[in-house]
Image (spheres, helix red, strand yellow):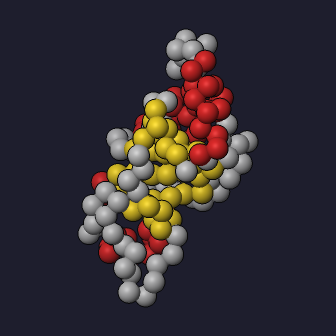
Amino acid sequence: MIILKKGVEEKCIYRVIKTISKDKTEIANNSIFNLEIWNTFKEDITKFDNIGTFINSDQKFDPSFKDLEFLKIIQINFLTFKDGRPFSLAKNLRKKKSFKNQIRASGHILPDQHSFLLRCGFDSIEIEKDDKDLWLKVLEMESEEKYQPF
């Protein structure tokens, strides 16, 4: 996987944690935890630095302001490119919850959705390594002019 931020490849410092063993050794700095793990082990996780959560587009996520203080990244996974809920979630995190840290898009997203992702509050995108050249080519053609400004 590759992380693109502002059209430039960025080194990913995070590892995504989808399961936790009984001894909880997976809980560490620079980790993104799926929503179930976040909700179950929040007290343990918040003792570490540079942590985040991973949400699928079909999951309900309405974090408290206190929860958001701990999260350095929220990764929202598009289950299908036709799903608009991640756009709304990112926008709500920015506007209603004043979330200032990173929001990353992953999953089924298309290069021509890039400007909409940015406009809704996403900072970075996780893509397949094989798709990197296509994404960079499309981003190169992207215009700064917006036809429907906010």
Q: Is residue 90 visible?
A: no
Residue 3 picture location, percent across and down: 49, 44
User: Based on the displayed image, in which of its 4 quarters is residue 59 positioned?
Assistant: bottom right
Is residue 38 at all visible to an observer of this figure? yes
Residue drawn at point x = 59 percent, y = 52 percent: 77
The residue lying at 41 percent from left, 57 percent from top is 14
- Identify the residue at horizontal 31%, vertical 57% (top origin): 50
Which quadrant would residue 96 be assigned to in this image?
Answer: top left
Q: Is residue 117 above or below residue 144?
A: below
Q: Position of residue 97 (x, y in %)?
A: 39, 45
Q: Residue at x 35, y 60 (%)?
A: 30
Vertical position of residue 9 compared to residue 41: above or below: above
Q: In the drawing, does residue 88 fall left or right of residue 52?
A: right
Q: Position of residue 135 (x, y in %)?
A: 61, 32
Q: How many labels, in total?
A: 0
Q: Who is closer to the viewer here, 8 or 81?
A: 8
Extreme bottom residue here?
A: 22
Q: Position of residue 124 (x, y in %)?
A: 47, 40
